[in-house]
Amino acid sequence: MIGKQEVLQGGIYHFDNKPFIVKEWTPELEFTKEELQIVPIWIKFPDLDFKYWSKVVLNKIGRLVGKPIMVDHNIEERNRLNFARILVEVEMGTKLPCGKV
């Protein structure tokens, strides 16, 4: 039961670089396609000044678009420092900002 709860609450999972949804199985569960209302998207900041690459600042920027989920693991670990990125949940139909700010 503990492992099941950890998986169900584990956040976003990816398989073959595609996000997928994990749900608790019940005998009544119907396998139908569900229309998503909220989707996770990665926001990439290729020209963001290095001084803004903290988790706190990236979450503040992410809140301008949606609900921040996580900062790229490589940014937190300071491994790959080509660009900053953050995973954000966004409601379908939301107009996203584009281009340079």
Image (tube, grey):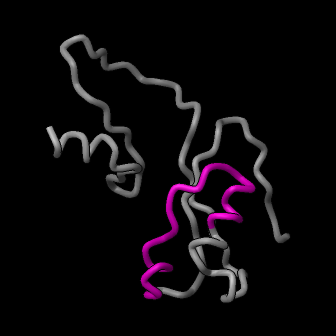
Q: Position of residue 61 (x, y in %)?
A: 71, 65
Q: Position of residue 64 (x, y in %)?
A: 75, 56
Look at the picture and state if 80 lies above or below 58: below
Could you tell me how many numbered marks the image carries?
0
Residue drawn where x is 72% and y is 82% of the image: 47
Q: Is residue 64 left or right of residue 89?
A: right
Q: Is residue 101 left or right of residue 61?
A: right
Residue at far right of view: 101
Look at the picture and state if 36 lies above or below 40: above
Q: Quadrant of the C terminus?
A: bottom right
Look at the picture and state if 6 lies above or below 27: below
Q: Nearer the viewer, residue 79 or 64?
A: 64
Q: Position of residue 65 (x, y in %)?
A: 71, 53
Q: Quadrant of the N terminus?
A: top left
Q: Is residue 56 left or right of residue 80?
A: right
* Residue 18 magenta-highlighted: no
Residue drawn where x is 50% and y is 62% of the image: 70
Quarter-wise, where is residue 44 in the image?
Answer: bottom right
Residue drawn where x is 39% and y is 57% of the image: 17
Q: Position of residue 56 (x, y in %)?
A: 61, 71
Report the magenta residues as a range: 59-79
